[in-house]
Image: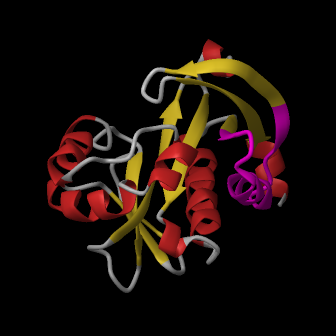
Amino acid sequence: MDKVIVTDRLILRKWRENDAKRLYEIASDPEIAKGAGWLPHSDESYSKAIIRTVLCEDGTFAICKSDDPDMPIGSIGIHIGASKKRGIERDDEGEIGYWIGRDYQGEGFATEALTAIIKTCFMEIGLSRVWCGYFDGNEKSKRVIEKCGLKFSHKNEHLFNGLRQEYYDESMMCISASDFLRI
């Protein structure tokens, strides 16, 4: 999925190395990092390394406002395939992860980006189901996922996050292609 996705207000595009300064600005926020399950970015070179090693993966996009496509406000990506640890059993399913910088929360950008990725997963890739999880206590993320039509499936409890050196619980939500097409 190496394409640009355009919505009414957003452009979802591949991350670029020259996004490192901007990524550091928004990903160094401890609250954003905690909600996404990683450590706050420590400097611009760390952000550049993350772009080169993690955000370069196929299916991962910088979320940019249409009026400023060179200024990411967050990130979203789809990982396709089974994951027994997460309770995803089939190879024709995928899990979406996303985060939005604090200054851009509450404006519907996450919902718009998530809806666009879900639509792409079903209409273009042909997945049968998509999943999205949120860490317990992250009510903002739960609301975004629910607005996109996903329903609670199961809870993964007492998982260990090696980056953050802590245990966490997460709720997994999902929607099938047939249910999405009825919305």
* Up-down relation of residue 45 to residue 182 (above or below): above
Residue 128 located left or right of residue 12: right
* Up-down relation of residue 127 to residue 115 (above or below): above
Which image quadrant: the N terminus? top left
Does residue 142 belong to the magenta stretch? yes
Question: Residue 160: where, in percent of width, then height?
Answer: 57, 19
Point 68% across, 54% down: residue? 141
Toward the viewer: 146 or 121?
Answer: 146
Question: Residue 74: where, in percent of width, then height?
Answer: 43, 61
Toward the viewer: 156 or 180?
Answer: 156
Where are the magenta residues, as a range? 132-153
Does residue 149 belong to the magenta stretch? yes
Where residue 49 sits, quadrant-wise, is top left
Q: Is residue 9 in view?
A: yes
* Up-down relation of residue 52 to residue 161 (above or below): below
Point 15% across, 61% down: residue? 18
Q: How is the image coloured?
A: secondary structure
Which image quadrant: the C terminus? bottom right
